[in-house]
Amino acid sequence: MRALDDLVRQGKVRYIGCSNLPAWELMKALGVSRAKNLHSFKTTQSFYSLAGRELERDTIPLLNDQGLGLLVWSPLAGGFLSGKFTRKGKGSGRRAAFDFPPIDKERGYDIVDALAAIAKAHKASVAQIALAWVLANKTVTSVIIGARKMEQLEDNLGAVDIELSAKELTQLDAVSRLPLPYPLWMESMGSDRRPGEARSFDAARQK
């Protein structure tokens, strides 16, 4: 952090960010910067998509709490959410040759089916709807797209003009939502120790 602080103070960079850090390491870095009066991370570059929502468990709450930006890499999950990949065919492109980032394929196919239905209603591509979902998250600052062809770039850019309805966002959330890990499922139950709250075991089961 001291070396990065030197770069900012020397005018070689304006802001510093990190990439792929777990939430605890990012928070530790912010704490060190504050304790030592150093320039701190302003953003993280992290994987986030309908097929990869793990960031919502710890990192996104941290970013919201600390006021950091989020630059999303692979918002189409390596092309899996482009519409080329379905249960009937493996598709083509980089994902077919290099299966990364890792995702739950069966869950992913359900997501693609939901995207396709919404895309048809909007007269848009599956990729555009997947990108529009990411952009609808207020924590997201911007997305990093990996278009190889001009038509892919133009298609991806069209996502900024798509506004998903509350019903569509709910549909996509339902098909892509991850089960809550401990202790988050415990927190979702509420607490009988807080005034005005009661613990609900049903709340945890519904997650």
Image (spheres, grey):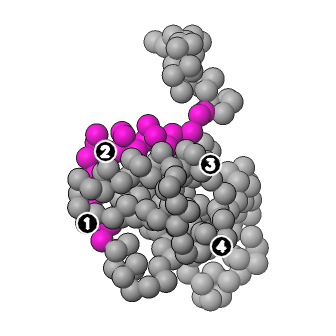
Q: Which residue is mark 1?
A: 161
Q: Nearer the viewer, residue 38 or 12?
A: 12
Q: Position of residue 161 (x, y in %)?
A: 25, 66
Was residue 143 drawn as part of the magenta stretch in this picture?
no
Q: Nearer the viewer, residue 128 or 109?
A: 109
Residue sitting at x 46%, y 48%? 111
Marking on residue 114: none
Is 4 rendered above or below residue 195? below
Q: Which residues are magenta?
A: 158-180
State which mark lies toward you, 4 or 3: 4
In what element is the residue under mark 2? helix
* Amino acid carrying mark 1 in the image: Asp
Sequence-wise, the earlier of marks 2 and 3 is 3
Label 2, label 3: how many angstroms apart (C-alpha)? 22 Å
In what element is the residue under mark 3? loop
Question: Which quarter of the picture shows residue 199?
Answer: top right
Label 4, label 3: how many angstroms apart (C-alpha)? 17 Å
Q: Which residue is mark 3?
A: 104
Sequence-wise, the earlier of marks 1 and 3 is 3
Q: Which residue is mark 2?
A: 168
Label 1, label 3: how many angstroms apart (C-alpha)? 29 Å
Residue sitting at x 46%, y 65%? 84
Q: Which residue is mark 4?
A: 97
Left or right: where does residue 124 sit relative to residue 2?
Answer: left
Q: Position of residue 9 (x, y in %)?
A: 64, 82
